[in-house]
Image: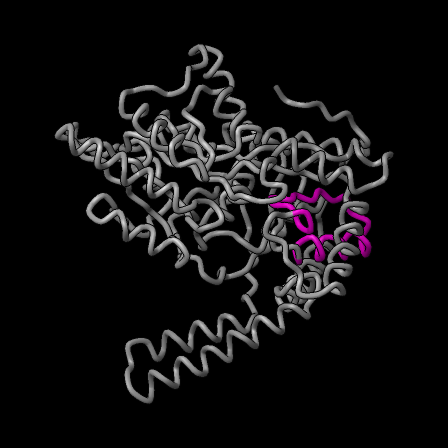
Amino acid sequence: MKTVLMITYEFPPSGGSGVQRSLYFARHLGEFGWRPIVIQADRVLGEQQDPGLLRLLPPGVHRHVIPACELGIIEEKWRAWLHGREGFAGRLREGIGWRLGRAANSLGSLLVPDEKLFWGIRALRVARRICRRSVNLLYSSAPRFVTHWVAWRLKSRFGLPWVADFRNMWTQDWAYSPASVVRRLSDRRYEQAFLNSADAVVSLSEGNTCCLASQTRADRRNRFVTIENGYDPDLFRNATPEHRDPGVFVLRYVGVLTAHQVTGEVFNAIRRAAQALRAQGRQLRFELYGRFGQDVRAHLETLGAAFHYGGYVPHDQVPGILQGADALLLAVNQGAHCNGVIPGKAYEYVGSGRPILCLTPAEGEVSRMMGKFGAGLVADSTNEEAIYEALLNLVRGERGGSAPAGERSALLRQLQRRELTRRLAELMDRVLSGEVPFTRTRRS
């Protein structure tokens, strides 16, 4: 059994979408001859804890938990300690909390490669002790990009082969906004070092893979491969969908919803569709499970009784929530380089079998995914009329065509977490054997 040291900041018991990919890789790698050792943070600031995810790990997975070390955690604890206090104590909470937040942001903008550097230094010490024993290969998952920094340092010290997984882009990401030109140059220097040092670079979509490969020398571009996110069919087989009221059409969203994904036109269209159904003696209800940004709160409030907030739910309950909906809302971030992004939830949405209203430009990879699976209808998030018509079409039972059952089943099998882990294990075997560069082929 070969040993892979997995360096990932986000890992259970922390919840959220960022933990899923590394969790399922760690769960299934043992089936393909790799024993994972995980180095992780004890918590992710701003994310709920979901201890039930740890039950998915087989007994042989060893975890080394490094305490998160950042001012933001001190700020969070301070605010929690003074929560609900009024008068002078309340003003003190806000004043000191605001200053701690400013200090955390200022310090984070100075740390390279990112604000988790102090955690990375401690993780590097632990990783060095592990690598002195028996480690065959390094795997790092980012963001946070300090994980790649740790793997980069380990490769330099021990000469171990390294697979770098870019779950998101870095300097090419739609949300990237460095504090200064100096910071941009520093980030680019580290990004280039990681891309040119890793024996293989993995990303989630063909668009992202091509973008990352274009930043390196031509003779290295065959080291870049695509391994998508996926879904776990076992969760859906064991799920219990809640009863659907035939008089209420339920549109659901699971995850974090911000103004980068939706505009006022989206909520105007939902409100108009609710009014149209009410005239027919039916109801439309938009339900959100997870978190929403303050920038969309006012829009949600305009929906009134047509909106229901379900709060955060453990991941093992998500399949039942998805399958209990009449339709699912998938909102993709808007901005530069977003056309190549496929949100992790898109795969679970498709795996649920429920029709999807996808808000994304027609030329994006998510739009192509919807068409390939016949999974739902696509509309631009700024086109209120198109969203309104798509909602009414979903209520009528339309879902944008459908792939033949056999073809759809074959495509879904390729996106199962176990199959994706098999592809990662094969990649690691080839890297370990020195079989690089290798041919990268576009998946149909």
Q: Between residues 49 and 127, which one lies in front from this camera angle?
A: 49
Point out the stretch of residues depicted in magenta: 146-172
Q: Between residues 231 and 209, which one lies in front from this camera angle?
A: 209
Left or right: where 257 falls relative to 141: left
Quarter residue 106 falls in:
bottom right
In percent of the image, x 63 and y 54: which residue is there?
176
Q: Is residue 384 above or below residue 174?
A: above
Image x and y of residue 366, in percent:
52, 31
Residue 238 in sight in this render? no
Q: Is residue 273 above or below residue 15?
A: above
- Magenta run includes residue 152: yes
Q: Between residues 31 and 294, which one lies in front from this camera angle?
A: 294
Image x and y of residue 281, in percent:
12, 30
Quarter residue 423 falls in:
top right
Q: Residue furthest bottom?
A: 88
In percent of the image, x 28 and y 53: which residue is there?
301
Q: Is residue 317 above or below residue 120?
A: above
Q: Quadrant of the C terminus?
A: top right
Residue 203 in sight in this render? yes
Q: Residue furthest front?
A: 385
Image x and y of residue 293, in percent:
41, 56
- Magenta run includes residue 342: no
